[in-house]
Image: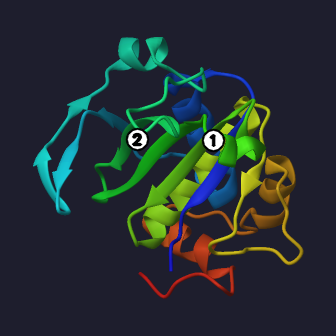
Amino acid sequence: MSVSLEASMYKPITLAAMIDQTRDILSGLLGLATMPELVVVAGRKYDDGVRTDPGHHLDAAELGGTVIGDPIPPDESGLSGSVHYEIDVPATGDGVRLAVMDFHHEEFAEFRGYRYAELDPYRTSVSQAVATGLALAVAQLADGEIVDDQISRFAPPVSDPGQIIDLTRLSEPGTDFAIQCETYMRQFPRRTSHP
Protein backbone atom coordinates (compact mmCIF):
# COMPACT_ATOMS: atom_id res chain seq x y z
CA MET A 1 0.00 0.00 0.00
CA SER A 2 1.29 3.42 -0.95
CA VAL A 3 1.38 6.13 1.70
CA SER A 4 1.75 9.08 -0.67
CA LEU A 5 -0.25 12.30 -0.50
CA GLU A 6 -1.06 14.68 -3.31
CA ALA A 7 -1.81 18.38 -3.46
CA SER A 8 -3.25 20.34 -6.37
CA MET A 9 -1.37 23.53 -7.27
CA TYR A 10 -3.24 26.43 -8.85
CA LYS A 11 -0.38 28.92 -8.54
CA PRO A 12 3.41 28.66 -8.33
CA ILE A 13 5.34 28.78 -5.05
CA THR A 14 9.02 28.85 -4.11
CA LEU A 15 10.69 25.93 -2.42
CA ALA A 16 11.74 28.34 0.36
CA ALA A 17 8.10 29.23 1.06
CA MET A 18 7.16 25.54 0.99
CA ILE A 19 9.83 24.62 3.57
CA ASP A 20 9.02 27.57 5.86
CA GLN A 21 5.29 26.80 5.74
CA THR A 22 5.93 23.09 6.31
CA ARG A 23 7.97 23.83 9.43
CA ASP A 24 5.21 26.12 10.77
CA ILE A 25 2.49 23.55 10.03
CA LEU A 26 4.42 20.67 11.59
CA SER A 27 5.21 22.73 14.68
CA GLY A 28 1.48 23.35 15.15
CA LEU A 29 0.36 19.81 14.28
CA LEU A 30 2.93 18.13 16.51
CA GLY A 31 2.92 20.62 19.39
CA LEU A 32 6.65 21.31 19.12
CA ALA A 33 8.50 24.55 19.84
CA THR A 34 11.54 23.56 17.75
CA MET A 35 11.75 21.65 14.50
CA PRO A 36 14.63 19.73 12.92
CA GLU A 37 16.17 20.97 9.69
CA LEU A 38 14.50 20.03 6.40
CA VAL A 39 16.94 19.86 3.47
CA VAL A 40 15.83 19.99 -0.18
CA VAL A 41 17.92 17.90 -2.57
CA ALA A 42 17.91 18.25 -6.37
CA GLY A 43 19.38 15.82 -8.89
CA ARG A 44 19.42 12.71 -6.73
CA LYS A 45 19.48 9.61 -8.95
CA TYR A 46 18.69 5.94 -8.49
CA ASP A 47 19.24 2.78 -10.50
CA ASP A 48 16.96 -0.14 -9.57
CA GLY A 49 16.31 1.44 -6.17
CA VAL A 50 20.02 2.00 -5.40
CA ARG A 51 21.15 5.61 -5.01
CA THR A 52 23.75 6.35 -7.68
CA ASP A 53 24.03 10.13 -7.28
CA PRO A 54 23.53 11.92 -3.92
CA GLY A 55 22.31 15.06 -5.64
CA HIS A 56 22.82 18.64 -4.54
CA HIS A 57 21.53 20.22 -1.30
CA LEU A 58 19.87 23.52 -2.21
CA ASP A 59 21.06 26.51 -0.20
CA ALA A 60 18.84 29.42 0.93
CA ALA A 61 19.37 31.40 -2.29
CA GLU A 62 18.53 28.37 -4.45
CA LEU A 63 15.42 27.60 -2.38
CA GLY A 64 14.25 31.20 -2.75
CA GLY A 65 14.92 31.19 -6.49
CA THR A 66 13.37 27.80 -7.31
CA VAL A 67 9.70 27.89 -8.22
CA ILE A 68 7.40 24.88 -8.46
CA GLY A 69 3.91 24.96 -9.91
CA ASP A 70 4.70 26.72 -13.18
CA PRO A 71 3.83 24.88 -16.41
CA ILE A 72 6.25 22.02 -17.13
CA PRO A 73 7.02 21.01 -20.73
CA PRO A 74 6.08 17.41 -21.57
CA ASP A 75 8.73 14.70 -21.63
CA GLU A 76 9.45 12.66 -24.76
CA SER A 77 6.24 10.64 -24.29
CA GLY A 78 4.16 13.81 -24.63
CA LEU A 79 1.89 12.69 -21.77
CA SER A 80 3.25 14.79 -18.93
CA GLY A 81 6.16 16.77 -17.60
CA SER A 82 7.61 16.58 -14.12
CA VAL A 83 10.28 17.92 -11.77
CA HIS A 84 11.66 15.98 -8.81
CA TYR A 85 13.19 16.83 -5.45
CA GLU A 86 13.76 15.04 -2.16
CA ILE A 87 13.28 16.53 1.28
CA ASP A 88 15.64 15.02 3.84
CA VAL A 89 15.35 15.13 7.62
CA PRO A 90 19.05 14.71 8.54
CA ALA A 91 18.35 14.49 12.30
CA THR A 92 16.41 11.24 11.86
CA GLY A 93 17.53 9.89 8.48
CA ASP A 94 14.01 10.20 7.09
CA GLY A 95 12.81 11.74 3.86
CA VAL A 96 10.11 12.44 1.32
CA ARG A 97 10.24 12.37 -2.46
CA LEU A 98 8.46 15.30 -4.17
CA ALA A 99 7.30 15.09 -7.78
CA VAL A 100 5.48 18.02 -9.36
CA MET A 101 3.59 16.92 -12.46
CA ASP A 102 1.90 18.70 -15.33
CA PHE A 103 -0.35 16.49 -17.48
CA HIS A 104 -0.66 17.25 -21.21
CA HIS A 105 -2.34 14.27 -22.87
CA GLU A 106 -6.10 14.39 -23.51
CA GLU A 107 -6.67 11.29 -21.37
CA PHE A 108 -5.58 13.42 -18.39
CA ALA A 109 -8.01 16.26 -19.19
CA GLU A 110 -9.28 16.43 -15.58
CA PHE A 111 -5.79 17.58 -14.48
CA ARG A 112 -5.47 20.40 -17.02
CA GLY A 113 -5.12 23.94 -15.73
CA TYR A 114 -3.10 23.13 -12.65
CA ARG A 115 -0.07 21.19 -11.48
CA TYR A 116 -0.11 18.28 -9.14
CA ALA A 117 2.41 17.64 -6.32
CA GLU A 118 2.91 14.08 -5.11
CA LEU A 119 4.64 13.55 -1.75
CA ASP A 120 5.98 10.01 -1.36
CA PRO A 121 7.47 9.41 2.11
CA TYR A 122 9.89 6.76 3.24
CA ARG A 123 7.91 4.14 5.16
CA THR A 124 8.38 5.60 8.64
CA SER A 125 6.11 7.66 10.86
CA VAL A 126 8.50 10.63 10.73
CA SER A 127 8.53 10.60 6.93
CA GLN A 128 4.76 10.20 6.75
CA ALA A 129 4.21 13.11 9.15
CA VAL A 130 6.67 15.30 7.21
CA ALA A 131 4.91 14.36 3.93
CA THR A 132 1.63 15.42 5.53
CA GLY A 133 3.13 18.78 6.51
CA LEU A 134 4.58 19.26 3.03
CA ALA A 135 1.29 18.41 1.29
CA LEU A 136 -0.62 20.79 3.57
CA ALA A 137 1.93 23.55 2.95
CA VAL A 138 1.82 23.11 -0.83
CA ALA A 139 -1.99 23.08 -0.86
CA GLN A 140 -2.22 26.20 1.33
CA LEU A 141 0.37 28.22 -0.57
CA ALA A 142 -0.79 27.16 -4.04
CA ASP A 143 -4.55 27.53 -3.36
CA GLY A 144 -4.99 23.78 -3.80
CA GLU A 145 -6.51 20.80 -2.07
CA ILE A 146 -5.22 17.59 -0.52
CA VAL A 147 -5.85 14.21 -2.14
CA ASP A 148 -5.52 11.50 0.51
CA ASP A 149 -6.71 8.30 -1.11
CA GLN A 150 -3.84 6.13 0.13
CA ILE A 151 -4.10 6.33 3.93
CA SER A 152 -7.68 7.71 3.78
CA ARG A 153 -7.56 9.61 7.04
CA PHE A 154 -11.19 10.69 6.86
CA ALA A 155 -14.50 9.19 5.83
CA PRO A 156 -15.90 11.08 4.05
CA PRO A 157 -12.67 12.58 2.61
CA VAL A 158 -11.53 16.05 3.68
CA SER A 159 -9.50 18.04 1.15
CA ASP A 160 -9.27 21.51 2.72
CA PRO A 161 -5.80 21.93 4.27
CA GLY A 162 -7.03 24.26 7.04
CA GLN A 163 -9.73 21.80 8.07
CA ILE A 164 -7.23 18.91 8.10
CA ILE A 165 -4.91 20.93 10.35
CA ASP A 166 -7.77 21.72 12.74
CA LEU A 167 -8.97 18.10 12.85
CA THR A 168 -5.59 16.40 13.29
CA ARG A 169 -3.55 18.74 15.52
CA LEU A 170 -2.19 16.87 18.57
CA SER A 171 -3.77 18.03 21.82
CA GLU A 172 -0.66 17.44 23.94
CA PRO A 173 2.60 19.30 23.24
CA GLY A 174 5.87 17.40 23.22
CA THR A 175 9.61 17.83 22.94
CA ASP A 176 10.71 14.79 20.89
CA PHE A 177 10.13 15.17 17.14
CA ALA A 178 10.13 11.44 16.31
CA ILE A 179 7.76 10.54 19.17
CA GLN A 180 5.35 13.32 18.21
CA CYS A 181 5.40 12.14 14.58
CA GLU A 182 4.58 8.59 15.70
CA THR A 183 1.77 9.88 17.95
CA TYR A 184 0.42 12.02 15.12
CA MET A 185 0.33 9.15 12.61
CA ARG A 186 -1.23 6.69 15.09
CA GLN A 187 -4.47 8.71 15.14
CA PHE A 188 -5.28 7.41 11.64
CA PRO A 189 -6.80 3.90 11.78
CA ARG A 190 -5.85 3.01 8.21
CA ARG A 191 -2.19 4.05 8.48
CA THR A 192 0.39 1.46 7.63
CA SER A 193 2.09 -0.51 10.39
CA HIS A 194 5.50 1.01 9.69
CA PRO A 195 7.38 2.49 12.65
The numbered dot on residue 167 is: none
Specify the quadrant of the image occupied by residue 61: top left
Q: Is residue 123 visible?
A: yes
Q: Which residue is mark 1?
A: 116
Residue at figure coordinates x 81%, y 74% from the top left: 154
Q: Position of residue 59 (x, y in %)?
A: 32, 20
Is residue 26 among what the camera can see? Answer: no
Is residue 76 positioned above or below 128 on the image? above
Q: Which residue is mark 2?
A: 38
Q: For numbered disc 1, what is the local secondary structure?
A: strand
Give the CA separation, mark 1 to mark 2.
21 Å
Which is more N-terminal, label 2 or label 1? 2
Residue sitting at the far left: 52
x 43%, y 20%: residue? 63
Query: Whole-percent x and y of residue 57?
Result: 26, 30
Q: With respect to residue 61, does 136 lie above or below?
A: below
Horizontal and vertical percent for residue 156? 89, 74
Q: Is residue 139 left or right of residue 132?
A: right
Q: Could you tell me the amino acid type at mark 1?
A: Tyr
